[in-house]
Amino acid sequence: MTFRERHPHLTMIGDFVDHVGDKIGGKLASLFSGDDEKQEPVERIVVHDKENPSCDPMLDDHEECEDAFIAAARQEYEHIKPSTQFKCGPVLRFQDIQVQQRRWIGSALIVTDKDDPRPPRMVIRDPTKSRVGYSSPQHLESWEGNHFYRYEIQLTLMGHREKRIEYWFETENGEKTKTPQKWNFHVPALDENHNWAFYSCNGFTSDVADPMGTHGGADPLWDDLLGAHDRLPFHTLVGGGDQIYNDDVLATPEMVEWLAMDEESRLSTPFNNEKKYAVERYYFDHYVQHYTTGTYSKALSLIPSVNTWDDHDIVDGFGSYPPKYQLCNVMQGIGAAATRFYLLFQQHSTAHIAQRAGLLTSKSGKGWSSITHFGKRTLVVLPDTRSERSKETILSSDTYDMLEKEIRQQLLPTTKHLVIVLGTPLVYPALTLFEASLDKLGDKLSRGSVIGKIFGKCKAFENVLGQFGPELLDDLVDSWACTIHTEEKRHLVELLQTLATEHSVRVTFVGGDVHVGGAGRLFGTESKDRLTDPYDMVQIVSSAIVNGPPPGGVIAALHATSKTYALNEYTSEQMTEIFDKDVDGTPLENKKLLNRRNWCSVREYHEQNQLKFTIRVENIDHVGTQKYPIFVEPLTVAPREP
């Protein structure tokens, strides 16, 4: 008699396990199928057990302490540094949470200039697992002897306990050590709170002559953010644009020479190999320097990031120049180089594996938008508002169609909040007053002008327009608040109003760029109850975490134009007063915008389905912050059929 005949009940269990295993294998395989098969072959990364490569202990082992308390030790940040064996890294990136699979997906990036064809594997310790996991490096790209490697990380989430994940590298400079350099990050519990931080404008513009003397340098608010992370860990770090200021690409000798040409020559000059190398060298060197110094480099290795980008990640004002300048060979070459290194450093990707990295590109072939689940209750959308930008358009109609389709597919029955991250604020004081004064202002575009300060423009933008012929309107069109973008803004809001109504989700906007803290809202003009109004949408404005704020005169000018405006026949918008007092307790006359450096913490209260946005505004002595909270309540109205 065979084993199957003697033990039919055990055989049935074995068959069931095999069937489930096949299903899981199919699901995992589907993660890497689809359009990627049509692209260039890329090595698949699997976090696996050293002794049994077919087993993934990070995913397959049962949790051994689901109900146990897992303490997170206090960080000793002086020991958290970029790895000495690499040129840059490690840098963590968050991609998504697959709720049904209870799976966290992310990656780590390192850059090395060593000739070793394969850097060491990453070792990952999950405190709920009996064995460590390993992630093998995937070679993304090389530039001038520097090699980019991506490590894929997939983890199983527990229901009610966040986990502190520890990671290090199997060898250091080719040798094993008993005391390897280690880092860590936190992943949320699936049924509990997903906490995150938002920042923007992470650098100084060239007009800040003495950053250390006037602002205490770049670290104060990053120190504050890591202190908050230490007390209650952030699971995700959201970069809202201008994570790096690359404007000095125009200060390279090759670009200075180009700007000095007459207009006809500038427009017709080819982006030859000499210029291409100079521009790419600038972007590479600047990213490495930015990612390996200061408190920011520590944050990159401790909190997984999800990013969109804005103009300074490319060059000041990119996309908003008049067409003949925006589309000339050199400007397009600058954009291509910036895109290459943005994808590598900020997205751990290349154009060939963008889909695998969770990036969305519309039919136009441009753009690197993303949509990601911050757990069961919050869906975050990060549109790419730079790649398709022109004077008239921010996003193409193809991108709007793609985003609507993807949002509808990604919304879960449990989703309560839809957060839209935009490089520049959607709700902001109207600028028609300034546009009406263009003739009087003439060609006085500069950081010293009100207009320049409103948009955080620096000398790079002034330099280009100064050479090309100043057109003040070109500065104004770099914001959703400009008249030229009114119809597109209305289209975006009405699209989100439809989604809010049909799915009963609360829409919230988060944006930076303008170097102030503040808040605004859209709302139904006839609404009597915010909780049941699907058109009620809060706008959080948070910037800059590093760059200097505009002067008080700009704040006064913005308040003078800050009124209640009609977006359409049934929707109004306005800025809201959230700053009764300054950080030192001084009463404020202008309560809507505060011109001090800041960042924003976001805490989820899952029992109330509530999000608490806290704008953390820098103290006068550059030590610590004062908190200004804004609560966003869920939408308490049943979804409507489309």
Image (cartoon, grey):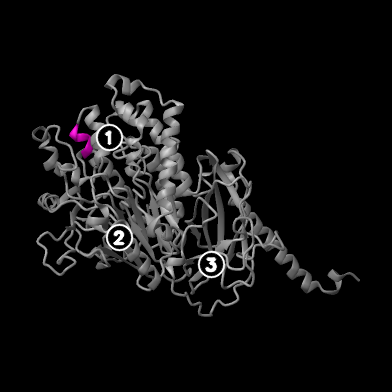
Residue tagged 1: 392
Mark found first going from the N terminus, 1 or 3: 3
Task: Judge by depth and name the residue closer to the eye, 597 or 429.
Answer: 597
Residue 429 location (% of width, % of height)? 17, 49
Q: Quadrant of residue 8?
A: bottom right
From the image, tell me which residue sits under label 3.
166
- Mark 2 or mark 1, which is nearer to you? 2
Q: Name the mark nearer the viewer: 1 or 3.
A: 3
Q: Which residues are the magenta region?
A: 471-476
Q: Which residue is mark 2?
A: 599
Q: From mark 1 to mark 3, how far is it between C-alphas?
A: 47 Å
- Residue at left 75%, top 68%? 14
Amino acid tagged 2: Trp
**Taking 566 as reference, is 301 above or below it?**
below
Between 343 and 396, the one lying in front of the other is 343
Lower position in the chain sequence, tag 3 or tag 2: 3
Residue drawn 70% across the image and 59% down it: 54
Mark 3 → mark 2, Cα distance in angstroms = 26 Å
Residue 550: x %, y % from top left: 18, 51
Residue 347: % across, % down: 46, 49
Q: SS class of the residue under badge 3?
A: strand
- Numbered disc 1: secondary structure: loop
Q: Earlier in the sequence, mark 2 or mark 1?
A: 1
